[in-house]
Amino acid sequence: MLNNEPNKGLRKKMKLKFLGAAKQVTGSMYMVRLDNGYTILVDCGMDYEVKKNPIERANLFPFDPVDVDLVLLTHAHIDHSGNLPALVNHGFRGHIMCTPATAELTGYLLYDSANIQFHDYRKSLGRAKKTRRDQVAKPLFSEKNVKQTVEQFLTVNYNEDFQITENIHVRFLEAGHLLGAASILVTVNENNKTTKIGFSGDLGRANSKLVKDGEIFEQADYLITESTYGGRKHFAIGTAEEELLQYIQKTCIEFRGRLIIPAFSVGRTQAVVFTINQLKKKGLIPNWLKVFVDSPLAIKSTPVYERHSYLLNEEALAFQKEHGSLFHFDGITYLEGMDEHDELLNYFDPCIIISAAGMVEGGRIQEHVMNNIDNPYSTILIAGFCAEGTLGHRLLQGQSTIRIKNTDKNVYAQIAKTDVYSSHPDHEEVLSYIKRSAENSRKAGKPIQKIFLVHGEEPQLMAMKNAVEGEGIASVVVPDMEQEFNF
Ligand SMILES: [Zn+2]
């Protein structure tokens, strides 16, 4: 049991409040406040909209972080974890519970985020006129705040019932979305009543690369689930190996060009590298073809996959048993320093370059895209979701010229997109998750009372609401920001 004293209050009922990812994708944050005042925050993610707005930046939390007793963290992605150091900076001193792999990955991502914010701040300060320097947005937190955040982590494995206080239990389940990602069940016994609230976190797809398939809650009274791709369907012509092989053959072997893959350093990069390794071991790509992973963060996060290999799926474990490492093979080089990065920019032989950020918004990948965009023999393969306004999104619009780093460039390279690495379920897959959750609860003798849809733009959430209601499963709510419900 944790020894956090609950904050005493005069509230009559347990409350659930939506403080982020309500009718939008980023900024996941939900508050559960018990009748006795004990306050739990589920996720504390960075809101990418707020990030740009200086007034909203100053009011990140519509509550006093000192009053929060515990944080439950579903997974490492910044839109779920990115405001934790700010929460700590504003006085939160409780534990942050997550799986061991999430704790490690989150630490690396938060240090990286602090570093990016510091450099962005210095750059903006340098560009701003003297009189306007005080208006430049300051970093939301420092490395020192990240260090303290990491010290507050308390790890828990999947499927272990963890008692928080006399009347609260939590249980983390495999979510199948990212190494260590969890769906979290919060069980509260209060006023002679047991209430189970299930938070899906971000879900994954069945048979995804590296991680296992997600699990379903045995019973929940309330289900809060993501619906990022409500109303949408993922398209894939074949398996990850088949799709990637096509691009490698055409670009690197036929055209003798370079295949540039923008990928997040945590998750996507490891999935792509593992696929290339599988193709190599099958002898489907030649030994002379070099692969470069140009990302210091990937160098840090890849060993987390190796340390927690017990979390990997059967396909990955079988490969590891037969061939040893999933992420290291002849011909692959991981680049850390800027001098190595600069050397790679002058490497003109056919090769595969994997670099971050995934949406091509900032990071080393921008220079690789810039370097190859006017080369008809190069291919830029977008392997994930790109938010509107990002360079990745603009590349996919099919324009003949594009502005990168204040320079207009002709687009002669092939621009391609694949959904095969998507780490979120599509419409049918989320609907199936909800149906199976409802079925489990019904079988357990206590049907789901309400389903809350979050982590999606409004049209995606409404498409899912209509589908779930059409099935007659349970009443569905698409909550507004700061909307509160009593249980
Ligand atoms: Zn995620």
Image (cartoon, rainbow, N blue to C red):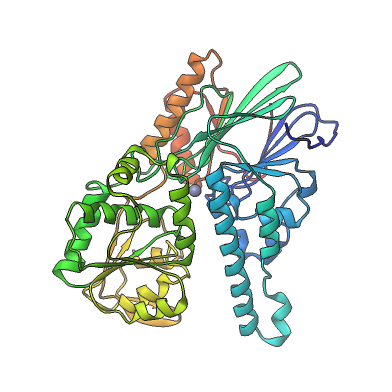
User: Residue lying furthest bottom in this view?
Assistant: 130
Q: Residue at x 70, y 28 (%)?
A: 168
Q: Nearer the viewer, residue 96 or 58?
A: 96
Q: Please tell me in which quadrant of the rendered image residue 52 appears.
A: bottom right
298 vs 35: above or below: below
Horizontal and vertical percent position of residue 40: 70, 38
Q: Quadrant of the N terminus?
A: top right
Residue 411: image location, x then y, percent: 29, 75
Q: Position of residue 417 (x, y in %)?
A: 30, 58
Residue at x-position 38% and y-position 41%: 426
The correct choice, above or below, for 384 with respect to 143 in the image is above
Residue 448 makes an appearance in the image: yes
Residue at the farthest left position? 254
Q: Does residue 53 appear left or right of residue 383 in this picture?
A: right
Q: Quadrant of residue 387?
A: bottom left
Measured as percent of width and height from the top left, residue 389 is found at 46, 65
Q: Nearer the viewer, residue 363 or 165?
A: 165
Q: Going 44% across and 56% down the picture, which residue do you hit?
A: 302
Tally the numbered discs: 0
**Residue 397 makes an appearance in the image:** no
Looking at the rendering, in which quadrant would you find the C terminus?
Answer: top right
Give the camera-side residue of 288 and 47: 288
Image vertical order of residue 453 relative to residue 146, above or below: above
Q: Tell me: 199 left or right of 261.
A: right
Q: Is 81 left, or right, of 320 in this rendering?
A: right
- Where residue 109 sits, quadrant-wise, is bottom right
